[in-house]
Amino acid sequence: MHFERPFFPPEDFKRVAIGLEENLKQLPQAPEGHISPDQAEFLYHLVRLIRPGFVVETGFCVGHSACVILRAQESVDLRPHLLSIDNCRFEETKTASDIVKNWFDGFTLVEGDSKEVLESVVNAYLKKNEGLTLDFALVDGGHDEKTAMNDLETLSAFLINGGYLWLDDFDKVVPCFGVNKAGRAFARQWGACQRFRTKDTRGFMLFQKVF
């Protein structure tokens, strides 16, 4: 088992979705770790199953997770609507955003600290796109406890009843202290959370809003 494997070659994602490998080959090299093939496969089929018309993610980096979500939305004949928030501290982020936007016109990147902009940009997006609801959200931005908890609480407030929230890097083999603390506190407060750990050592938590 590889405890420290932040990167995976695009070929490893070929089994996840048609066209995904080619998408990932054209993205800039990720400056830090990205979604694993096992996570990507789970995420792709989850999106296909729940068919979210609108998705929000915190933490775009260079777009691996975004491509998985957008491919999944298209595969079930949804017009993709994905809003990503990232502080763009890596120069590769904006380059990747332009590439993904060229592939999927329903993709939007907003630059900013999620603690400062998340609530306002989600609210503005929903007002602009009347009839959409937030059905699924992915938290993978700041990995300190304060930011992770802010993103969980803010997005859960917008989430429809029955919608899902994904907290990435929760309880993985190599622990992420801030994410673990935020995830456990959120789970204690709201329940309806399930932990998953993949064979390629990654971890995440899923929450379904029930009220």
Image: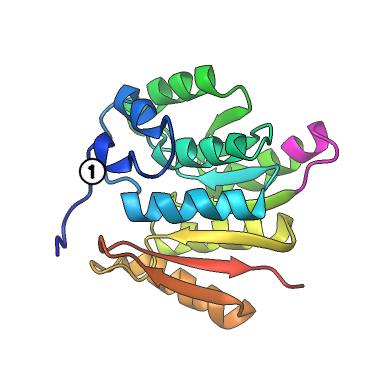
Q: Nearer the viewer, residue 210 or 84?
A: 210
10 Å crowding of disc 1: few (<14), some (14-19), many (20+): few
Q: Is residue 131 magenta?
A: yes
- Quadrant the C terminus occupies: bottom right
The magenta stretch is 125-133
- Residue extending furthest toward the right: 130
**What element does badge 1 sit on?**
loop
Find residue 118 and report its horizontal and vertical position in percent: 61, 45
- Quadrant the N terminus occupies: bottom left
Identify which residue is drawn at 77% across, 40% down.
Answer: 126
Q: Is residue 161 above or below residue 115?
A: below
Q: Is residue 21 magenta?
A: no
Q: Nearer the viewer, residue 12 or 195?
A: 12
Left or right: 113 in relation to 96: right
Left or right: 166 in relation to 10: right
Identify which residue is drawn at 32% across, 49% down.
Answer: 37
Find residue 114 and report its horizontal and vertical position in percent: 54, 46
Identify which residue is drawn at 46% across, 35% down.
Answer: 67
Residue 138 visible in this rendered orientation of the protein:
yes
Q: Is residue 98 above or below residue 8?
A: above
What amino acid is at disc 1? Phe
Identify which residue is drawn at 82% across, 37% down.
Answer: 127
Residue 36 visible in this rendered orientation of the protein:
no
Residue beneath disc 1: 8
Find residue 168 and report its horizontal and vertical position in percent: 42, 58
How did the renderer colour the structure?
rainbow
Left or right: 20 in relation to 30: right
Find residue 35 and report its horizontal and vertical position in percent: 35, 48
